[in-house]
């Protein structure tokens, strides 16, 4: 603010005679100063609020953090027994045998939102491309309207539908089929233990980054294909075991993820639709005029043009998925049984934990403090994802890569 | 290449009122005329680029080498393979420089994987871009200058070995040096390819055209060899246009 104001009040450019103090006063019209002050105040309100919330949350969370220490990454959460003598740890008193391990909830939040995004992004982008390229123009408005309506469905309705209709359907049909199919192929990579698969995944991702930075020319394509194969194998080895095993509830992690995907699709699709609309016609005609088909044009021209934007909107959607509370609370519930054994199991997310527990623990200050700590973690993840997203977009759009709407 | 009674309608308005003429093969024909006279519309109806614009209707006939462009069962894909086009502004693919050249031939199944590198080098050399980009073939083309981007688009078009080349004011956004370079290329290419060039620039038409088609308000005013058109035009309106009284 101070910097801004100084710059604005400085002498105007041009060969004006050296202004006296009185003249300088007149050089800055009073309206400008007022506008600047007002916009300054209003502009800083959101930032100030964010900082304020962060500080309050951090301060409130301190007792629980002191009480648990690294126990936050434990697998067991319990508000404790209020009728017995409090447990004291590191000078902080908490209800008897209280434990604040949030690891299952952290994982629940990350996994549900990751599965939701992994489904929602291709569905949105594919759907939008189909809509704009192949659906006749008169029908596009209708489908677009439906999409916007989907975005307007309150999350509590998604939650009700998920728990009463979709969940039972998952339990009776989809989940058994899925676990049957994936569990039926144990021979795909039997030689690859899950732990090794994770390590391999790390290697594959590192390989991608190194290839991107150092290998050029025709060799790059070949190397990238190799790295892609590794990525697929390790991803399958690491993730597939979670998709096998018994199905024990209607409101499992997978059900929650699918409902979450449904909630995120309209957000991503609406933005993607705008992005596709803004791809220059000239760029597409360049491809069509070479006899490329619509599908090839979409792949070669449209997708690269919108990729950065899709990344940005995906991160936005991710933010929504992480924070989504009421539908998750309905569906996945609030089960403190440690880390789910597979994605058909019930579990909890940070938000469902907070929503489900707060009411019961209001009298115990340290329990409330623990919930604030969970909330702080949630806030920090979404802030990090936001900043990370911005960073990626700047990197991608900056140097090597193909810009959004630039160049043509 | 023959165009017979070509009419193009957009919704209710007729943009071209029955244009008929024959282009000489392996020659450069310039299409000139005032803004909005239908030059680009005419050009785009030859490779059926109007197909994808809702509300555009084309009647009449265009034949290339005796084959009807608007015939039943004619594949637009094959047609556009034979009829290349260059636009007013460079529109390279948001892909690497090498891919810009090789994507379309690969899509048409014209090259095997082993021939791609040679194809890229051959066509980038043909347009005189090879030395400038050979070290950054896997980079984005958007860092090239406007003229280089347009040359890349030309290379991309030529990589399909077209029989006809449609140029829609290809140099209107370029500097004089690049313009001269592209004009030279076009002249050289016309030994193998039939070139149609839309241009606002009469001096350019004079420099490179063998024939000139003068359009006004969607109708042909005059179609004559360039020398005749510029030195001794038959129509009074042509004379007015050349001398700058209308334009």
Image (spheres, coloured by chain):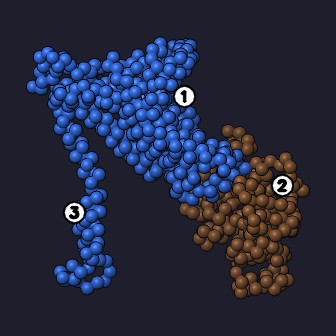
Q: Residues within 10 Å of mark 1 (few under 14, many from 20)?
A: few
Residue A157, above or below B200:
above
In the depicted structure, whether residue A148 falls above or below residue B182? above
Look at discs 3 and 1 and give the one toward the viewer: 3
Q: Position of residue A57 (x, y in %)?
A: 22, 38
- Residue A184: percent from left, percent from top: 56, 13
- Looking at the image, residue B84 sits to the left or right of residue B64; the answer is left
Q: Is residue B91 above or below residue A58?
A: below
Can residue A82 be seen from the camera position used here?
A: yes
SS assignment at label 1? helix
Tag of residue B70:
2
Same chain? Circles 3 and 1: yes
Label 2's element? loop
Q: Nearer the viewer, mark 1 or mark 2?
A: 2
Is residue A300 in sight in this rendering? no
Q: Residues within 10 Å of mark 3 (few under 14, many from 20)?
A: few
Nearer-N-terminus badge (3/1) = 3
As helix, strand or loop, the secondary structure at mark 3 comes to helix
Q: Residues within 10 Å of mark 2 (few under 14, many from 20)?
A: many
**Rendered image quadrant of residue A194:** top left
Which chain is mark 3 on? A
Q: Circle 1 sits on which residue? A: A229
> Residue B90: where, in percent of width, then height?
61, 60
- Distance, label 3 to label 1, CA atoms, is 54 Å
Could you tell me which residue is drawn at 71 percent across and 39 percent down? B112
Question: What is the letter of the brown chain?
Answer: B
Q: Which residue is mark 3?
A: A2
Q: Are marks 1 and 2 on the same chain?
A: no
Q: Color used for chain A?
A: blue
In the rendering, at what x and y percent does residue A292 appear?
70, 47
Q: Nearer the viewer, residue A83 or B70?
A: A83
């Amino acid at each position: 603010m101070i910097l801004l104001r100084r710059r604005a009040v400085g002498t105007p450019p041009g060969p004006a005679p050296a202004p006296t103090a009185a003249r300088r006063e007149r050089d800055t019209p009073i309206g400008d100063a007022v506008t600047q002050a007002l916009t300054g105040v209003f502009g800083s309100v959101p930032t100030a609020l964010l900082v304020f919330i962060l500080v309050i949350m951090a301060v409130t969370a301190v007792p629980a953090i002191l009480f648990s220490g690294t126990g936050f990454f434990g697998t067991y959460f319990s508000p404790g027994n209020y009728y017995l003598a409090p447990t004291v740890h590191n000078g902080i008193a908490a209800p008897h045998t209280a434990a604040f391990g949030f690891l299952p909830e952290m994982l629940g939040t990350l996994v549900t939102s990751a599965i939701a995004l992994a489904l929602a992004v291709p569905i949105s982008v594919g759907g939008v491309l189909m809509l704009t390229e192949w659906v006749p123009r008169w029908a596009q408005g209708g489908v677009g309207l439906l999409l916007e309506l989907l975005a307007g469905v309150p999350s509590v309705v998604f939650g009700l539908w998920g728990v009463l209709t979709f969940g039972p359907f998952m339990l009776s049909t989809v989940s058994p089929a899925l676990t049957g199919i994936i569990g039926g192929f144990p021979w795909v990579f039997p030689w690859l233990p899950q732990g090794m698969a994770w390590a391999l995944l790390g290697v594959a991702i590192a390989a991608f980054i190194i290839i991107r930075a150092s290998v050029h020319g025709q060799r790059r394509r070949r190397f990238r294909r190799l790295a892609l194969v590794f990525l697929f194998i390790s991803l399958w080895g690491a993730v597939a075991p979670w998709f096998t095993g018994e199905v024990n509830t209607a409101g499992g992690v997978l059900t929650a993820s699918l409902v979450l995907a449904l909630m995120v699709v309209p957000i991503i699709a609406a933005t993607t639709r705008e992005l596709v609309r803004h791809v220059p016609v000239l760029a597409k005609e360049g491809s069509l005029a070479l006899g490329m088909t619509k599908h090839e044009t979409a792949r070669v021209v449209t997708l690269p043009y919108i990729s950065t934007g899709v990344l940005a909107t995906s991160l936005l959607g991710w933010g929504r998925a992480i924070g989504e509370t009421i539908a998750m609370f309905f569906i996945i519930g609030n089960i403190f049984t440690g880390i789910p054994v597979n994605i058909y199991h019930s579990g909890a997310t940070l938000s469902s934990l907070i929503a489900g527990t707060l009411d019961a623990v209001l009298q115990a200050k340290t329990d409330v403090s623990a919930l604030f700590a969970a909330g702080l973690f949630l806030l920090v993840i979404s802030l990090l994802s936001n900043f990370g997203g911005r960073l990626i977009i700047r990197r991608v759009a900056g140097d090597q890569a193909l810009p959004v709407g630039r160049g043509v | 290449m023959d165009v017979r009674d070509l009419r193009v309608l957009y919704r209710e308005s007729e943009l071209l009122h029955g244009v008929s003429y024959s282009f000489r093969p392996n020659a450069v024909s310039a299409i000139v005329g005032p803004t909005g006279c239908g030059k680009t519309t005419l050009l785009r109806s030859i490779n059926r680029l109007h197909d994808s614009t809702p509300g555009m209707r084309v009647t009449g006939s265009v034949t290339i080498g005796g084959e009807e462009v608007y015939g039943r069962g004619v594949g637009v894909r094959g047609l556009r393979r034979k009829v290349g086009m260059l636009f007013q502004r460079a529109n390279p693919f948001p892909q690497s420089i090498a891919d810009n050249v090789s994507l379309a031939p690969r899509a048409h199944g014209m090259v095997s994987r082993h021939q791609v590198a040679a194809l890229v080098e051959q066509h980038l050399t043909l347009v005189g871009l090879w030395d400038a980009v050979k070290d950054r073939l896997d980079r984005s083309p958007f860092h090239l200058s406007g003229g280089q981007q347009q040359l890349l688009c030309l290379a991309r078009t030529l990589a399909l070995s077209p029989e006809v080349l449609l140029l829609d004011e290809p140099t209107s956004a370029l500097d004089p040096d690049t313009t001269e370079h592209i004009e030279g290329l076009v002249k050289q290419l016309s030994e193998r390819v039939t070139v149609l060039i839309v241009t606002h620039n009469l001096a350019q038409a004079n420099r490179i055209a063998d024939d000139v088609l003068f359009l006004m308000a969607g109708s042909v005013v005059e179609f004559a060899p360039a020398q005749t058109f510029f030195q001794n035009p038959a129509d009074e309106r042509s004379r007015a246009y050349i001398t700058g009284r209308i334009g």
